[in-house]
Image: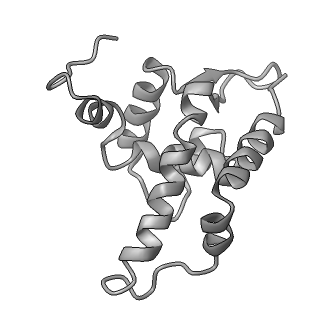
Amino acid sequence: MKTDFRCDCPITSAIDLIGDKWSLVVVKNMLFYNLKTFKELSATSEAIATNILSSRLKNLEEQDFLTKKKPADNKKTNIYRLTDKGLSLLPIIIELAIWGDTNLKAVHPSLNRDNPIEYIKLNKETFIKVIKEQYKNKGAIA
């Protein structure tokens, strides 16, 4: 799939690929909650509309951020897995988490504080490495 980039700037071009409202949310849910199916991804608290989810999954697959396969025992279900390119978004997601924790408290008082954000801030590289390893070890499909 050919992507129409607005300009030659690497930041703007990256936003052209993953800067919509949902793509990083889908990747986050796959990474942190091991969600692998359309049904699992559509049942999250973010309440993504099914047509939007379908569009984002298709785009992420076309851009090689994830793969889609059918398990041998169930030809109706698609299993989505992040590629190395998709996993490379983890540091961006971590930086957004840190930024959100630091900057959104005043405007979002119910912001989830039940997360290991202080540990992440102090051990960012280790945390990223552990999450990537855990994700990779969570199973290939049959």
As displayed, is residue 86 above or below residue 49? above
Q: Quadrant of the N terminus?
A: top left
Whole-percent x, y for residue 92 in the image: 48, 47
Say which of 30 and 93 sits in front.
93
Q: Relative to the observer, which residue lies in front, 128 or 108? A: 128
Q: Is residue 129 left or right of residue 17?
A: right
- What residue lies at 69% left-to-right and 61% top-to-bottom? 123
Residue shown at 79% from the left, 44% from the top = 134
Give residue 44's position: percent from left, percent from top: 55, 59
Q: Is residue 38 found left or right of 18 in the rendered image?
A: right
Q: Nearer the viewer, residue 40 or 123?
A: 123
- The color scheme shown is one colour
Give percent across and percent down for residue 108: 36, 82
Residue shown at 44% from the left, 18% from the top: 62
Position of the C terminus, as image quadrant, is top right
The x, y position of residue 95, in whole percent, is 48, 56
